[in-house]
Image (spheres, coloured by chain):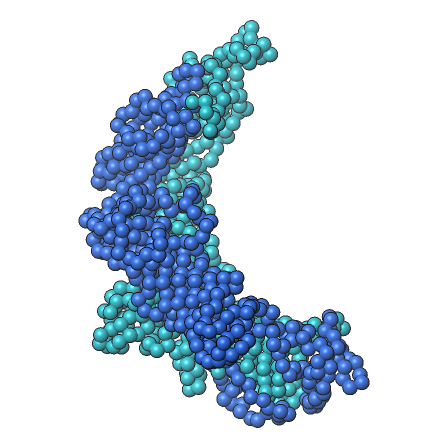
Chain colours: A cyan, B blue
Amino acid sequence: MRRGGLALALLLLAAGVPAAAQPLVVSPGPEAASVTVYRNPDRRDSEFDLDWLEGYALITETRTLRLPAGESVIRFEGVAGGIVPVSAIVSGLPGGVGEKTRDARLISPGTLVDAALGRRVHIRRTNRRTGKVTEADAVIRSGPNGIVLQTAEGFEALRCTGVPETLLYDQIPEGLSDKPTLAVSTTTRAATTATVRLSYLATGFDWQASYVANLAPDGKTLDLFAWLTLANSNDESFVDARANAIAGEPNKVEEGDSEPAPVSSEISLRCWPQGTTSDIPYTVPVQSVGGEEYYEQGGADIVVTGSRIRNPNLSSSSPVTVISAEQEDLGDLKLYRIPIPVTVAAHAQKQVALLSRSKVPYERIYGATLRAGGEDEPTPAGILLRVWNTREKGLGLPLPEGNVAVFEPAGGTMMLAAETPMRDRAVGEKVEFEVGESPDVQILQRRVLKKDEKEQDEDDDHPRPRVYEVEISNARALPITLELSLVNYANAKIVKPSHKLGLKDGSRMWLARVPANGRATLRYTMKPLPPKPEPPDEGDDDG
Amino acid sequence: MRCLLPLLLLAAPAAAQPPAARPISPVGPSAQGDVAITIYNNDLALVQDTRQLAIPAGLSRQEFPDVSAQIRADTVSFASPDTGIVEQNFDYDLLSPGKLMEKAVGKVVTIVRINPATGGETREQAKVLAANGGVVLQIGSRIEVLRDDGLPVRVIFDQVPPNLRARPTLSVSVESSRAGIRPARLTYLTKGLGWQADYVAAFDEAAGKIDVQGWITLSNSTGTGFENAKVVMVAGSPSGQNYGGYERGDSANLRRAGTESGTRERLGDYYLYPLERRTTIANAQTKQVSFLDVQGAPARKAYEYRASWLETLADPRSVDTVLRFNNSSGGLGDQLPAGTVRVYVKDRRGDPQFIGENRIGHTPMGSELAIRTGAAFDVKVKAVVEKREKVGEKRWRTTMRYTLTNARPQAVTVDLSQAGLDWGWEDTRIAEESLKSERFSSDGIIWHVPVPANGEATVTATFDTRY
């Protein structure tokens, strides 16, 4: 055991020290941490993959260090594996920060050979028959792709002989470490204890808002509840951390190639050509320490804080939660703070209540968009649930982007009516949940020919006005409201509508009220306009 | 640990002692001399390595181990007093077991057979006849294929062929008029060394101030470490490929290029950022050194939105949040090398939180910068083409409506621009507008739209265009 301890100390001394002469202060981990999680900007309404989280986090750690007088190097261990080292900020050092370094030469079979190139190592051979072990000094002359050794006897190739043999090293060569390591140098006037703050951005985090909208049996109001789900795919846990999530769209630039990829490799043994009759397959103990880490599937730990309900999608009414995230403005973003310290565990997901509002009035609206002057078979109308994000209408709070699961009462239980994405909605905005199509409400558009009119009489050069009809049929036992947009791409004007047409997003819109088990019809005329000019070509010197 | 324990326990003398023990000499530390490195932005660095070499009189061959593994061998130059270059070589014939055997064809090697039953060793001298898909040996009067029977056989070579090396090696053959130790300077370009700037900007919106720390980030992926080097960074990319012109990317953040001169050292049109102390740049290392620390420079936040031509949005879009500051003597007071600016603001508890980042290009002193940090959650624009009608043979009249909403408790001003006015014809007119615009170019106009707190503002405009 004592020897083991000695070896460990050697390893620590030898690994990852930017300048060997300066004393090394190793900070094993944070005493307190705060984790602010940012969404993956490119993930829209898809669920996140717990093994491949593409959001990020700002981690701020507090660490207490005992600093010697004079120059020293502080090595920060236990930082999140996804650290973006160039974003690291160290504050609170009495002597300030000299230089920050991040070393990415990792201990691996290949880098051991590479670092030991030209140095003295040992070769150990074991006699298969007698079990006798022989050791000799050797110098590595080439590697790691096919290793040539120089021994007292001459030159030999490693493991091309069929004899069990392996290399032994006296120590880990200087500059190799088990993981990419962040270190800073500092100069302190007198030995002291300092509390420093280390903050950095790290990948391998993500969060999302998941909404549950429960429609009340009265058909007029809904209860809106949302979970804030945080996830961490790093190997490090942050115990009793202050956790926050940021909604909105902070700009993130692509990380360039500014950082060298971690250097690690395996040994690939190549020998001289061997006759096809004599190829002896030998097994090479291949170990790989890569920069990429793959995680075990299915081991993710899902923690629901403040509630016993594990899956919101199965709940029939808004869960009862005892804590809820607190929202504040952060510049032009929204910050959600979990009010109690929580543990952001490695490879784990955590949920807390984001918001909850009950008795929010909603309108059930049917909608359809038709091309003016087109002919359409009966098509089902879309269903929208419309709420207004205002205090008077029961909401009035920022709604961060997320998926909405809509539940409707049916036969005494709640049924999932729809799952629909929602973008960021500010206070005062209209919020619409698209919940599918209604086969009961169908829309049809057709051209109406006058008594003596025939389609084949048309003359393309002198088009005549055409009359169209839109018919909405309602098979529901309730009167409905339908917003029909007529998008006009034709070179014609909509005139003489049989109902008053409004304007929505630059298109003509008919707000149709269709009686229960009834129909409503709109008739309008497309009046042709003079022919359009050819679309302009750039560089045409016509003007 | 696993390596050490057996070593300590198994110190028993080896049974089969080699017949003739020869001294083997491991190499010492790096062969580099006094190293000076100049790093440019475009994955290019100039290395000057001055070594003390013992050069004999007459013709000799000098090898230079420990040069960058990504050396551009065609750029090497060598200079030493009283010597002339005969030729420069870059040998990349690497030593491997296969090469070792190929080069041993026709030579005699020692083979050691291990008896699988007894473990006993038998030594024989063998001549390598061929190494084509299998090694054919002549042992005495017999011919056999190496390890054709699958039994363990060690092959021991007397020497390594002289031109096979562990790593690509640079050598220079020189003619010297005298013998003696003297400095020899090796200069070459290499890839794998690069640098950029990283800025930490702490923004205090209420005070309208920004604290900026600038860090030089240099990284080494050459495969070689450089010890105790003098390092200077050059803010520039000396390459004919990106001479002026288009597609520079980061220029949108530079609103007005400055005309002030800084006090930093220059190299032609480039600025130099020397490191104060000599430093060791290990392979696969990223190193950051501070070069700028400014407190309380003026800065403000702005909202911008650029509508494209004939844009109709069904859903309102968030406007851009832009941080505006300058680097004239009253601002950051320094030219800024290209890099990433990360912006932080304090939350209600006083903890700094990240609110977005963006890149800047090399920015001369005195410039006005506007970097987009993200989108505003609460400030949105909805642009709608209200009407589009033909008014003449080749003229169209387009009415746009822009609805701006603000859910913040403070009034804001949005710089709303309409682009796409110039499509090859410069005679676009603004027939009517509800707010006075500025025409910033033939292609676009801009309105500075005040939007009340928790309120809404509308701008309408009618454009008279050829298309």
Q: Quadrant of residue B14?
A: bottom right
Q: Using the image as rendered, state which of residue B374 and residue B176 is in the foreground.
A: B176
In this view, the residue farthest toward the top is A452
- Name the residue: 76% across, 73% down: A277
In the current view of this chain or complex, which residue is farthest to the front?
B177
- Please tell me in which quadrant of the rendered image residue A398 appears: top left
- Residue A118 place in picture, x, y as percent: 52, 78
> Residue at position x 47%, y 26% from top?
A540
Work out whether A367 lies above or below A284: above
> What is the tally of numbered marks visible in this picture?
0
Residue drawn at the location 40% of the way across and 20% of the way down: B396
Is residue B40 visible from the viewing direction of this image? yes
Residue B29 in sight: no
Extreme right residue here? Answer: B141
Is residue A491 positioned above or below B322 on the image? above
Foreground: B87 or A148?
B87
Against B1, residue A333 (above or below) is: above
Of residue A200 and residue A382, the one placed in the foreground of this image is: A200
Looking at the image, which residue is at 72% across and 87% down?
B124
Q: Horizontal placement of A41 versus A289: left or right?
A: left
Q: Quick one: quadrant of the C terminus of chain B? A: top left
Q: Quadrant of residue B302?
A: top left
The correct choice, above or below, for B337 with respect to B432 in the image is: below
Q: What is the x, y in percent for residue A421?
A: 42, 42
Q: Position of residue A490 (x, y in %)?
A: 48, 20
Residue A369 placed where, x, y %? 46, 27
